[in-house]
Amino acid sequence: SIKAIESSSKEDDTTWLTYWVVYGVFSIAESFSDLFLYWFPCYYVGKCLFLLWCMAPVSWNGSQVLYHNLIRPCFLKHHQTVDSVLGTLGTKA
């Protein structure tokens, strides 16, 4: 999904691909922290509000903000390493 977002051909799918990248990162982070977070009052309400913010049809929605400020810089910093690891795994498979 990140490769599709960063490709030169921009189409309508960029918005939803951005959402799914942010949702995937959120799901991975939540799987590690869910043991502690579910004890907080209104955790699930906050989670629903966060996901609604990520899907909101506005230019400042959560997916765009989080992707451009957190995920994209990290990806651009490490994408060569990720590509080489995936290439190695592909040849071994």
Image (cartoon, rainbow, N blue to C red):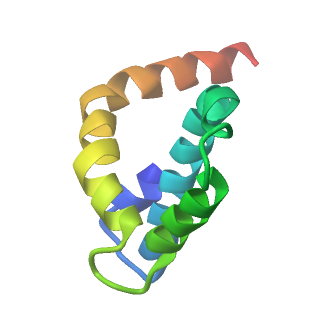
* 61 relative position to 51: left or right: left
Please determine whether, in this image, residue 15 is positioned above or below residue 37. Answer: below
The percent position of residue 87, horizontal first and vertical second, equals: 55, 23
Please determine whether, in this image, residue 62 is positioned above or below residue 73. Answer: below
The percent position of residue 74, horizontal first and vertical second, equals: 29, 34
Residue at 61%, 49% in the rendered image = 41
**Along the viewing direction, whichever of 37 and 11 lies nearer the viewer:** 37
Residue at 38%, 20% in the rendered image = 81
The percent position of residue 48, horizontal first and vertical second, equals: 60, 65
* 33 relative position to 12: left or right: right
Residue at 28%, 81% in the rendered image = 59
Where on the picture, by quarter, is residue 36? Answer: top right
**Along the viewing direction, whichever of 36 and 91 lies nearer the viewer:** 36
Where on the picture, by quarter, is residue 73? Answer: top left
Residue at 55%, 35% in the rendered image = 29
* 74 relative position to 45: left or right: left
Please determine whether, in this image, residue 68 is positioned above or below residue 30. Answer: below
